[in-house]
Amino acid sequence: MERAMELCAQSHGIAFIRTSRPTFPVIYKNDEPFAVGKAKVVRKYGGEQVLLIGAGVTLHEALKAADELASKYQIKARVIDPFTIKPIDKETIIANAKECGGKIITIEDHYPEGGLGEAVASAVASENIRVQILAVRDIPRSGPPQALIDMFGIGSKSIVNAVLNFK
C-alpha cells in the first residue's frame, strides 16, 4: 500500500487505489518495487496451461485456485498481478499468455464494463489468445466478503471451474 500511495502522489492526472475490507496474507514486502504500467508475475511453475489475472482480493482467489488446480487436477496455472489497469502491461500479458497455451482468465470484484477483463481482452485482441472474464454480473449487496466473492462467482472454486471448462 505504501508503494501505491507514493506512485499515486508522484503521478500526473487521475489515480485511485482500490482496497478491500478483508484481511489477506501479505504478498509483497514493503520494499518491493512497483512501476505504473508494469505487471508482476506472482506464481510461475513452467509449463502452465492457463494464465490467471487478478488484482487485490481476486489475486488472492487466483492464487488459491492455482494451488487447488495443481494439487487436485495436476493443472499448472500462472498468476499475474497487473498492478495497474490503465496503462495495462500489454507486453507482459501477451508474452505470459503465449507461454500458457493462449488462455487467460481474468477475475475482478466489480462489473466487467471498463474493468480488468476488458483491458486485457483489448490488449490481446490482435493475438491468438482467448480471454474469459469472471466478474460481478448481478446487483451488488452487503454481506461477509468471502460469501459475496463466492456468490458472485469470482472465488477460487469458480476460477477452478472456469479453468476446467475452458475450451
Image (cartoon, rainbow, N blue to C red):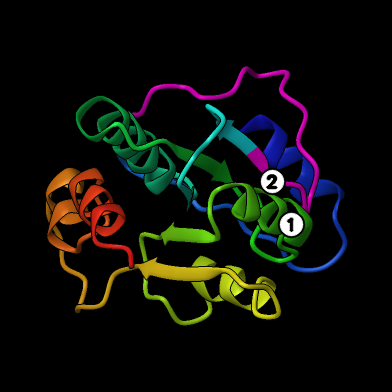
In the displayed structure, 68 sits above or below 30; it is below
Q: Measured from the top left, where is residue 135 in percent x and y?
A: 33, 68
Left or right, 46 with respect to 12, comes to left
Q: Measured from the top left, where is residue 19 in percent x and y?
A: 46, 47
Q: Amino acid at mark 1?
A: Asp
Alpha-carbon span between mark 1 and mark 2? 6 Å
The numbered mark, 1 or 2, whose residue comes first in the sequence reads 2
Does the residue at mark 1 contact the one at mark 2 (Cβ under 8 Å)? yes
Q: Nearer the viewer, residue 152 or 21?
A: 152
Give the residues drawn in magenta, as a range.
23-40
- Sort mark 1 into few (<14), some (14-19) or many (20+) by Cα contacts within 10 Å: many
The circle drawn on residue 89 is 1
**Point 85% across, 55% down: residue:** 11
The circle drawn on residue 39 is 2
Magenta highlight on residue 62: no
Residue 24 in which image quadrant: top left
Q: Quadrant of the N terminus?
A: top right
Left or right, 63 with respect to 71, comes to right
Left or right, 50 with respect to 82, comes to left
